[in-house]
Image (spheres, grey):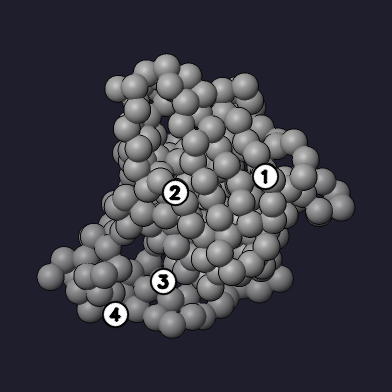
Amino acid sequence: GESVGLHLPTLSVQEGDNSIINCAYSNSASDYFIWYKQESGKGPQFIIDIRSNMDKRQGQRVTVLLNKTVKHLSLQIAATQPGDSAVYFCAENTPLLPSGSARQLTFGSGTQLTVLP
Amino acid sequence: GAVVSQHPSRVICKSGTSVKIECRSLDFQATTMFWYRQFPKQSLMLMATSNEGSKATYEQGVEKDKFLINHASLTLSTLTVTSAHPEDSSFYICSARYETQYFGPGTRLLVL
């Protein structure tokens, strides 16, 4: 569901290490999930998505894991680079109607990733 | 990926004036676009869903008479903040759906 807070969770990692960013979602009817990266002063940038019929999907240096049992999503970034520093948001796509034709994207609170040199 | 643009990227206006923000899908057609607002250090909050050729659907608590949305074509949606006040200062972001949702670069609005 919607999550608004004044303080973003933060994660600091050393350059070259792997990063794991976690997200809990609230709606068991959500069937599609997206990870976005947002750099300061810019709009969110699509990273990777996953549908609820999958539990893992890999992209270039990124992997998304989905655990529907506990409604948990994670983003793993391999060999983290300085350019990966940003706020990362998970988003769940929920059908608003039984037909599934109307859908709404709900964002998590975000995690600030800082890559240390 | 699909490209969404916004104009202007930032705007400063006096209290009481109206400001129009444009959102365009550059390489695809979008029957549905979305408008979000984001305050510093916070997540994106959906304001309204813009439907081409019909009225926008507003989220609870968003004043439709203050935030006018027009989706006149399959590639353009506009958000007009009418009689803007300092509390309307925020980062406004639009998105459009093309298989997934792609976001514009955002518009920073500062109302003095």
The residue under label 4 is: A79
Query: Which quadrant of the figure contains the C terminus of chain B?
Result: top left
* Same-chain status of marks 1 and 3: no
The residue under label 1 is: B71
The residue under label 3 is: A76
Q: In which quarter of the image is residue A49?
A: bottom right
Spatial separation of the CA atoms under disc 2 and disc 3: 34 Å
Contact, CB < 8 Å: mark 2 with mark 3?
no
Q: Indicate which label's residue lies in the foreground, 1 or 4.
A: 1
B103 or A76: nearer the viewer: B103
Please name the residue shown 73% across and 48% down the image: B52
B2 or A9: nearer the viewer: B2
Q: Badge 3, how many Cα within 10 Å: few under 14, some, many 20+? A: some
Please name the residue shown 67% across and 63% down the image: B29
The residue under label 2 is: B7
Please name the residue shown 41% across and 71% down the image: A76
**Among the two numbered marks 2 and 1 on one chain, the one whose residue lies closer to the N terminus:** 2
